[in-house]
Image (cartoon, rainbow, N blue to C red):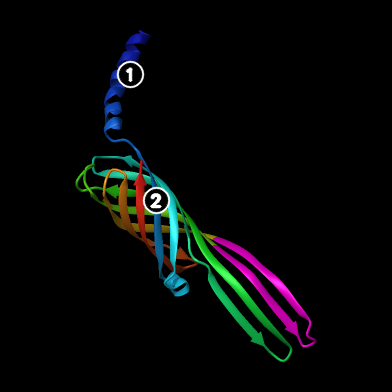
């Protein structure tokens, strides 16, 4: 009886095995760059950030895939030098600020031409963990010429939701190019990014 049940179970799972073999999950490495948009650009200017990520595309239908991902971005440090003088004391500071972010989420990929199609569209939702790291020093001098120097090393983080829309083009089985606009925020300000990436698939 147990042999019959195992045979029936094997026959029942056989179609899923063929589907899995025909549409395998695809792990990928993402390498790219990003430019700041919105309020973020007012602070970052034209500086370009770099990013890297990992993803796993899971086929849902012949044209639709679900792709969980984990990624990290880092932007160049911003330098801020300032001085203040009065009759009682003077301050002089030199501080750098660096923005970075981890993103946890997933994309939905739609290929109008099916698995062999080159062009695809994507929409994603993420949790973006912003990190702001300030470091440097400042020196204060009073009217008696007593000078003190202090080190600055502060870190703050903020979790914010983000969403993305974009498109990609598959050059061959292992290489794709993607462009996306990511809408995010930081303390009610629009910290958006425009991103380009190479996607290297296994």
Residue 73 at x, y percent in the picture: 46, 58
Q: Is residue 81 shown above or below 197?
A: below
Rendered residue at 33%/18% (across/down):
9
Could you say which is closer to the camera, residue 114 or residue 125? 114
Residue 15 at x, y percent in the picture: 26, 26
What main secondary structure does the magenta stretch of the protein show?
strand
Dot 2, crowdedness within 10 Å: few (<14), some or many (≥20)? many
The answer to whether residue 163 of the structure is visible from this angle is yes
Q: Which residue is mark 2?
A: 30
Q: For numbered disc 2, what is the local secondary structure? A: strand
Q: In the picture, which quadrant includes the C terminus? A: top left
Residue 70 at x, y percent in the picture: 45, 49
Mark 1 or mark 2: whose residue is earlier in sequence: 1
Q: Which residue is mark 1?
A: 9
Q: Is residue 26 shown above or below 137?
A: above
Circle 1 or circle 2, nearest the eye: 2
Dividing the picture into quarters, in which one does residue 146 lie?
Answer: bottom right
- In the image, the segment drawn in magenta is 132-157
The answer to whether residue 129 of the structure is visible from this angle is no
Rendered residue at 60%/63% (across/down):
155
Could you say which is closer to the camera, residue 111 or residue 147? 147
């Amino acid at each position: 009886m147990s042999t019959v049940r195992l045979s029936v179970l094997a026959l029942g799972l056989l179609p899923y095995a063929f589907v899995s073999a025909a549409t395998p999950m695809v792990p990928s490495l993402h390498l790219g760059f990003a430019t700041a948009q919105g309020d973020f650009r007012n602070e970052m200017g034209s500086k370009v950030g770099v990013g890297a990520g990992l993803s796993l595309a899971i086929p849902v239908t012949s044209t639709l895939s679900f792709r969980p991902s984990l990624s990290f971005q880092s932007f160049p440090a911003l330098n801020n030098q300032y001085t203040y003088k009065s009759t009682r004391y003077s301050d002089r500071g030199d501080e750098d600020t660096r923005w970075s972010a981890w993103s946890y989420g997933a994309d939905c990929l739609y290929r109008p031409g099916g698995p062999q199609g080159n062009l695809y569209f994507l929409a994603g939702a993420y949790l973006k963990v912003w990190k702001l790291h300030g470091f440097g020093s400042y020196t204060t001098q009073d009217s008696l010429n007593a000078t003190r120097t202090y080190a600055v090393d502060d870190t703050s983080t903020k979790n914010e939701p983000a969403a993305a829309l974009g498109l990609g083009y598959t050059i061959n089985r292992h290489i794709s190019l993607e462009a996306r606009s990511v809408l995010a925020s930081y303390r009610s300000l629009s910290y958006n990014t425009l991103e380009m990436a190479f996607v290297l698939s296994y």
